[in-house]
Image (cartoon, rainbow, N blue to C red):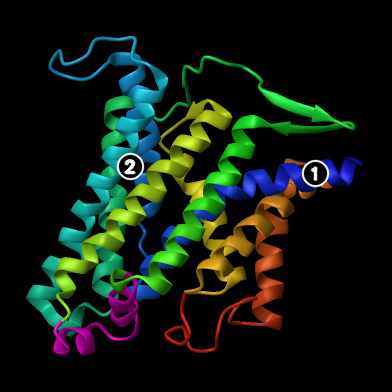
Amino acid sequence: MVIIQQLISGSMLGGIYVMVAVAFTLVIGMLNFLNFTIPPIFMLSAMVSWAVAKFGLPFGIMAPPVHWLFALIVGIFVAIIASLIVERFTYRYLKNRYGDATEHAIPLVSSIGFLLIFTNVVIIYFGSEPQSFPMPFDDVSLKFNGLVLGIPQLISLLVSFGIVWFLSYLLKTTKTGRILRSIAESPDTALLLGVKVFAIVPIIFLIVGFLCGLSSALFTVNYSEVSAFIGDEVAAKAIAGMVIGGLGNIWGAVAGGLLVGILEVLSIHFFGADTVKITVWGALLIILIIKPQGIFGHVKIGKEKF
């Protein structure tokens, strides 16, 4: 019974990692570079939500206290805007100016620049200490047969699966999905075939911003604590889940994110919190040795994606 409870808890924690892992997967699968702005966008959404809930909206638009749900929605909106800004200056501007020279180091390095900017702006204005997010409830859970299901965690898991299913449907069955997959295979070829790449790529970053904001909101609801560094830990485990599941594979990111969540909870239960990183990254190392492309990945990242 104890093991079953840990598996349930780990799966629900993994729901948060799933969405962040899918965000990484979309960018690396379609544009073939690792977007380091995902951790600070995740963090920025949480910190903005906390600031709005505590201080209200600026310029006297809305005075505190602000309802927690509205504050979370503002945080999601800010994450989307931040992601679109990143697209404008890490992909579109550099691609227009330098062409193929942007593949793939320049966008990666510029995304690191945004990581540092977002993180340090938040530290300057709000500090680096953890902050408590005001929630209207303390503990909401279902109990049956000795098992405990946290309602916010369960909602996180269900929302994660719903979002991933919708993305999978979008990519496989719609015209927009086919265009996105053509860009994933070869942006230059898609451009020659008449695809307006620079009009479509922002959709990828919009989705990434939404995933970061939504996962950040669910994380905030579940743990009621935010800080300037929460994105780093979550994103590191999401990257591990993405690689374990297979680069460029959305459902692989789902499997990897859930596995990382389960491994984290089990390692805490059996060995203590200090062993989490050893367990997660040790599992990643073993997977890479046995199957370098990940559980559901392919030898060539650009092949059979999504």
CB contact under 8 Å: marks 2 and 1: no
**Residue at position x 35%, y 25% from top?**
71
Name the main secondary structure of what is drawn in magenta.
helix
Question: Secondary structure beneath disc 2?
Answer: helix
Q: Nearer the viewer, residue 190 or 268?
A: 190
Element type at mark 1 = helix
Mark 2 surroundings: few (<14), some (14-19) or many (≥20) residues within 10 A: many
Instruction: Please tell me how many numbered marks the rendered image carries.
Output: 2
Type of amino acid at the residue the image marks with label 1: Gln
Q: Relative to 29, is 218 on the left or the right?
A: right
Magenta segment boundaries in residue numbering: 177-194
- Write the residue at 68% across / 74% down: 287
Q: Report which quarter residue 157 is drawn in.
A: top right
Query: What's the residue at 53%, 45% (across, down)?
Result: 159
Q: Which label was assigned to residue 113?
A: none
Q: Which residue is mark 1?
A: 6
Residue 268 visible in rendering: yes
Depth check: give the residue in front, 270 or 50: 50
As shown in the figure, which amino acid type bears the numbered disc 2?
Answer: Thr
Q: Give the image location of residue 206, x and y in percent.
A: 28, 54
Name the disc covering residue 119, or none. 2
Mark 1 Cα-neighbour bin, 10 Å: few <14, some 14–19, many ≥20:
many
Q: CA distance from mark 2 to mark 1?
A: 33 Å
Residue sitting farthest toward the left? 97
Quarter holding residue 197: bottom left
Does label 2 or label 1 sit earlier along the sequence?
1
**Viewer can see residue 123:** no
Magenta-colored stretch includes residue 54? no
Residue 253 drawn at (x, y percent): 55, 64
